[in-house]
């Protein structure tokens, strides 16, 4: 078993708030990310797939195909967008890195043809990032 990772970047804006919270509670909970008119992040997404090396190619999968899948299914949908407004699959959720990573997983996991999606890492900034390995019953370390 070997793990192969593709790293991609996108820029997007968002505002974190819960419509059921008061303005005070939103400000206290989400801090700078609650700024009323939003703000941007330079996100970095790392997609890790695990699988066996195909003896005919020496590869787990075609990285070009993986890049194409992630670009069309995810990056093109979110790059230079307002995550609260412009992105259909993020409607109705608070666009934290956690929630975004879970949505990304649900979109690409069924579409990976060679190998198995192992891990998504989503950086909201250099120091803040989340790691998702799918729902508990599917997790393999
Ligand atoms: Ni933010």
Image: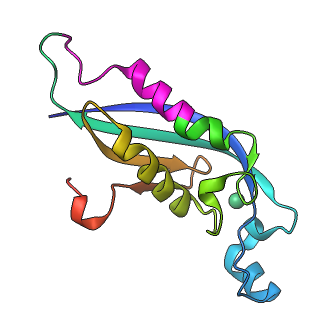
- Tell me: 64 left or right of 110: right
Between residues 34 and 69, which one lies in front from this camera angle?
69
Please, is residue 93 above or below residue 115 in the view? below
Part of the protein shown in magenta: 57-72
Please, is residue 102 above or below residue 80 in the view? below
Please, is residue 52 above or below residue 55 in the view? below
Please, is residue 68 above or below residue 44 in the view? above
Between residues 34 and 76, which one lies in front from this camera angle?
76
Q: Is residue 107 visible?
A: yes
Residue 81: image quadrant is: top right
Name the magenta segment's main secondary structure. Answer: helix
Q: Residue at x 73, y 65 (%)?
A: 33
**The N terminus, quarter of image:** top left
Q: Residue at x 50, y 56 (%)?
A: 103
Task: Give the image location of residue 61, x and y in percent.
Answer: 28, 23
Task: Give the image location of residue 126, x and y in percent.
Answer: 59, 46
Q: Is residue 8 visible?
A: no
Residue 73 lies in the magenta-colored region: no
Hey, which residue is sitting farthest top in the picture?
56
Task: Give the image location of residue 106, x and y in percent.
Answer: 42, 53
- Tell me: 62 left or right of 72: left
Question: Where's ligand 1: which quadrant?
Answer: bottom right
Task: Give the image location of residue 57, x and y in percent.
Answer: 20, 11
Q: Residue at x 66, y 44 (%)?
A: 78
Between residues 116 and 113, which one lies in front from this camera angle?
113
Residue 24: image quadrant is: bottom right
């Amino acid at each position: 078993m070997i793990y192969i990772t593709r790293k991609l970047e996108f820029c997007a804006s968002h505002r974190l708030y819960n419509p059921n919270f008061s303005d005070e509670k939103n400000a206290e909970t989400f801090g700078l990310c609650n700024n009323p008119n939003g703000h941007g992040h330079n996100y970095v997404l790392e997609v890790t797939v695990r699988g066996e090396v195909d003896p005919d190619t020496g590869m787990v999968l075609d990285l070009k195909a993986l890049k194409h899948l992630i670009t069309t299914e995810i990056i093109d949908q979110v790059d230079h967008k307002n995550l609260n407004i412009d992105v259909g699959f993020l409607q109705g959720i608070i666009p934290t890195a956690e929630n975004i990573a879970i949505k990304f997983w649900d979109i690409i996991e069924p579409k990976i043809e060679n190998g198995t999606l192992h891990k998504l890492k989503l950086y909201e900034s250099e120091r803040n990032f989340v790691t998702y390995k799918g729902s508990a019953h599917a997790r393999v370390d």
